[in-house]
Amino acid sequence: MDSNYWNQVYQKKNEHEVSWFQEVPKKSLEMIDELNLEKDSKIIDIGGGDSRLVDHLLGRGFSNITILDISSEALEKAKIRLQNSPKRLEFVTTDITLFEAHKKFKLWHDRATFHFLTQREQVEKYLKIAYDALEENGHLIISTFSKSGPEKCSGLSIAQYSQDDLKSMFGRYFKNIRCFEDTHTTPWNTTQNFVYCGFKKQS
């Protein structure tokens, strides 16, 4: 992926001008709530950029959150928005396929990053990095465009997945907990279909 491309996107557009914006990421939060994690659990949001998920996690009392994004511009916007947060947040600027975790996480969350990895080599790197970054019995939540979702996003080609696709792919490393599809409404009232899956790391 190209960091310059994504920096330009975030330079030109505010959060209400990107299709993936959610004021309240309801489905992600529902899945996280179901896990009953300890409030000091280490959580990483992949492609979190300027997402509002971190705001809601902080509101739920979580205190150990890492936000990873390829765009320094997106993370800078988040830093400004969250500058008065009493909790310590970690911001990591990197391509996810190059990420080297220096600690183990209890939860790996990714909404709308994975589908930008269109090459098999990228996908294989992602799976291995996620596995290595999670604690034993850690959780992974993935949300990506479904087979009936868009074929492009922000002008870029993406990969579409069915529930069975994700179960097969991630099932090599994780135990599937559940999958479902959901329709996301963009800020300009068009719709995009996503598939969500929850997994658990087991040896």
Image: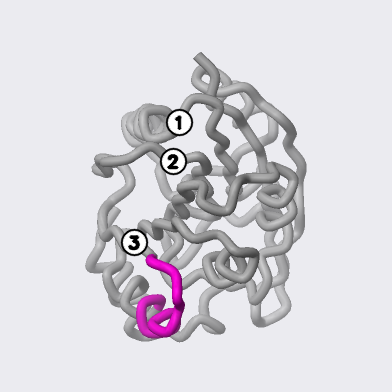
Looking at marks 1 and 3 on the same chain, the residue that comes earlier in the sequence is marked by: 3
Q: Amino acid at mark 3?
A: Glu
| SS class, disc 3 | strand
Q: Contact (CB < 8 A) between labels 2 and 1?
A: yes
Looking at marks 2 and 3 on the same chain, the residue that comes earlier in the sequence is marked by: 3
Q: Could you classify mark 3 by the number of other residues whose Cα lies within 10 Å: few (under 14), some (14-19), or many (20 or more)? A: few
Q: Looking at the image, which residue sits at the far top?
A: 203
How many marks can you see?
A: 3
Residue 44 image position (x, y, % from top left): 44, 51
| Residue located beneath label 2 in the image | 105
Residue 97 image position (x, y, % from top left): 30, 41
Q: Amino acid at mark 1?
A: Glu
| SS class, disc 1 | strand
Q: CA distance from mark 2 to mark 3?
A: 13 Å
Q: CA distance from mark 1 to mark 3?
A: 18 Å
Which region shows up in magenta? 78-88
Q: Could you classify mark 2 by the number of other residues whose Cα lies within 10 Å: few (under 14), some (14-19), or many (20 or more)? A: many
Residue 29 image position (x, y, % from top left): 68, 57
The residue under the point 25% across, 40% down is: 100
Q: Is residue 103 left or right of residue 84?
A: left
Q: Contact (CB < 8 A) between labels 1 and 3?
A: no
Q: Amino acid at mark 2?
A: Phe
| SS class, disc 2 | strand
| Residue located beneath label 1 in the image | 135
Q: Main secondary structure of the magenta part?
A: loop
In the rendered image, residue 176 lying in the magenta stretch gets the answer: no
Q: CA distance from mark 2 to mark 1?
A: 6 Å
Which quadrant of the view contains residue 12? bottom left
Q: Contact (CB < 8 A) between labels 2 and 3?
A: no
**Colouring convention used in this rendered image of the protein:** one colour
Which quadrant of the view contains residue 188? bottom right
Which dot marks residue 90? Answer: 3
